Image: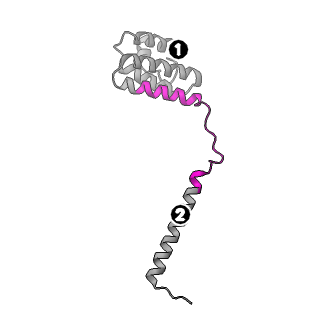
């Protein structure tokens, strides 16, 4: 029987492992992905969320139109879902630019529709509107 030194056995084991790993990676790269179907179109919620994120970034940068559009979009989203977080965030954005002329429209919308809601009940729009 052929007796190999420990160093030669170690080198042979390393080389064999490298060859086997290379073969497995080659097969893996050339095989199609199983069970993965690409989305045909992005989900509607994801598109709406990315639109809100874009408006948030622009409004945070001081863009007045984005601030107004974001507050309106969040109020519309609250009307659809009833999620108090959307109403709260909309009020935060309205308060950031309460001096804007366009926010008079938002203020009247808040007073007309949302002053009875617990999120807005003690907001200064509603307290002054009484």
In the rendered view, tell whether residue 119 sits above or below residue 18: above
* 59 horizontally vs 79: left or right: left
Q: Nearer the viewer, mark 1 or mark 2?
A: 2
Is residue 130 in view? no
- Name the residue located 38 percent from the left edge and 23 percent from the top edge: 59
**Which image quarter is the N terminus in?**
bottom right
Between 73 and 31, which is closer to the camera in this rendering? 31
Vertical relation: 1 (above or below) 20: below
Q: Position of residue 129 (x, y in %)?
A: 43, 11
Looking at this rendering, what residue extends furthest in the front direction?
Answer: 2
Q: Position of residue 73 (x, y in %)?
A: 50, 20
Task: Residue lying at the far bottom in this picture: please name it.
Answer: 1
Q: Horizontal and vertical percent for residue 87?
A: 49, 24
Q: Nearest the camera: 3 or 87?
A: 3
Write down the quadrant of residue 100 in the picture: top left
Q: Give the numbered dot on residue 113.
A: 1
From what the image shows, is residue 36 above or below residue 86? below
Residue 17 in picture, x, y percent from top left: 52, 69
The residue range painted magenta reads: 27-56
Residue 21 is tagged as: 2
Circle 2 — which element? helix
Residue 110 covered by magenta stretch: no
Residue at point 34%, 25% (across, down): 61
For image coordinates 54% across by 23% down, the residue present is: 78
| Front position in the image: 14 or 115 | 14
Residue 3 appears anywhere in the view: yes
Which picture quadrant has residue 36?
Answer: top right
- Tell whether 98 sits left or right of 24: left
Q: How dense is the environment of label 1, judged by Cα within 10 Å: few (below 14), some, or many (20 and up)?
A: few
Distance between mark 1 and mark 2 Cα atoms: 65 Å
Q: Is residue 55 magenta?
A: yes
* Quadrant of the drawing holding the C terminus: top left
């Amino acid at each position: 029987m052929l007796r190999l030194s420990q160093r030669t056995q170690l080198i042979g084991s390393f080389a064999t492992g490298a060859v086997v790993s290379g073969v497995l990676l080659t097969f893996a790269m050339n095989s199609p992905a199983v069970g993965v179907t690409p989305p045909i179109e992005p989900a509607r919620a994801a598109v709406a969320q990315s639109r809100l994120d874009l408006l948030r970034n622009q409004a945070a940068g001081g863009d007045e139109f984005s601030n107004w559009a974001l507050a309106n979009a969040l109020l519309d989203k609250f009307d659809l879902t009833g999620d108090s977080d959307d109403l709260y965030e909309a009020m935060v954005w309205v308060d950031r630019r309460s001096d804007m002329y366009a926010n008079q429209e938002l203020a009247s919308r808040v007073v007309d529709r949302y002053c009875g809601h617990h999120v807005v009940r003690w907001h200064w729009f509603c307290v002054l509107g009484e």
